[in-house]
Image (spheres, helix red, strand yellow):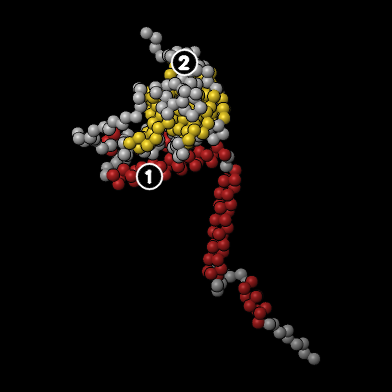
Amino acid sequence: MPPQKRKIRPESRAAKKVKEVPRRGRVPVGGKSEARDEQLESEEEDSDRESEDAIDDEDMETAEEKRLRLAQLYLTRLKEDEQERHKDEGGASDDDDSDDDVVEKKLTKDTLLMQGKTYNCIANSVAKASDDAVGHTIRGHQLAVTCVAVSDDETTCYSGSKDSAICKYDVETNKMVHKWPGDKNGKTGHKGHVLALAVSFDGRYLASGGVDRLINIWDTRTNALVDALRGHRDSISSLGFQMGTHQLFSASHDRTVKLWNVDEMGYMETLYGHALPISGLDILRKERAVSVAEDRTLRVWKIAEESQLILRGCIT
């Protein structure tokens, strides 16, 4: 019986043709597309490897390097913004030094603004008063006026006098709307000269002090006496609220500065340093106070740091 020939399936023939090695550099059918696919796969692998390397570099970046990179990016964007602004204004210099100066001024201004130390020049934008403008005189006291205070919204004004009274005025109508008379017993008003006034930032509280060594807190909405703060051993010479709070600073001829919490109507702290009676006090944006006294010194009280800066006047 003659031997039978083995049949080969069509699939196996195609597989053998694919496995055949082309001769003399010929590219088999479909070779170009396969080569292109291999090239694309290699490029994708390279891009993936580069992205992984970039991620590894970011992961290995230290905090100092990241801070430096972000700062350089911020300066570059800031310089580009300033150049565009100058171009819009009509004429900017492309000089690097001028750009650096502009960036430096911008950064300095932003820093001062964050610290609350910036100053804005508004003299050119303020309207000049007309020659016909005349100030108004409002009468209400029987003796000399010793102190005044104006609310932040500039609608209400207060005045204290040697007649122990405090007057409240409407700035728009130029009329007195209320008067707190003095009290010989010191229960419903001051006993003696009123020497200092201060209004809180929201206009809710009015603080007054005088020779009776009391700090009276008045509710401006009801015109009632809320409470009297005691602690000074001599006349109250100056008062001031910290901006944005109800913390009250008081200066006295007893050479001390005291800090009060008006919300709680309580005493907080006493600052010592002046050798003679304190004549003036003002409050900065931060928790700091500035006082001057007859000892010819100006002191900046840093409450949070528990320290003070002393500036001495010249001796003649």
Q: What residue is shown at x 26% (from left), y 37% (from top)?
A: 127
- Quarter of the picture holding the C terminus: top left
Q: In the rendered image, is residue 28 in sight?
A: yes
Q: CA distance from mark 1 to mark 2?
A: 53 Å
**Foreground of the two, 171 or 275:** 171
Instruction: Find numbered disc 1 in the image and state the secondary structure of the residue it sits on.
Output: helix
Closer to the eye: label 1 or 2: 2
Q: Position of residue 233 (x, y in %)?
A: 53, 18
- Quarter of the picture holding the N terminus: bottom right
The label on residue 164 is none
Q: What residue is shown at x 32% (from left), y 39% (from top)?
A: 172
Q: Position of residue 143 (x, y in %)?
A: 35, 22
Report the residue that reaches farthest toward the bottom.
1
Amino acid carrying mark 1 in the image: Asp
Q: Position of residue 105 (x, y in %)?
A: 38, 34
- Label 2 belongs to which residue? 277
Q: In the picture shown, does residue 92 fall above or below 159?
A: below
Tell whether 303 sits left or right of 221. Answer: right
Amino acid carrying mark 2 in the image: Pro
**Foreground of the two, 14 or 245:** 245
Q: Badge 1 local density, few (<14 within 10 Å), some, or many (20+)? A: few
Tell whether 91 sits left or right of 44. Answer: left
Report the residue that reaches farthest toward the right.
1
Q: What residue is shown at x 43% (from left), y 14% (from top)?
A: 294
Instruction: Find numbered disc 2 in the image and state the secondary structure of the residue it sits on.
Output: loop
The label on residue 81 is 1
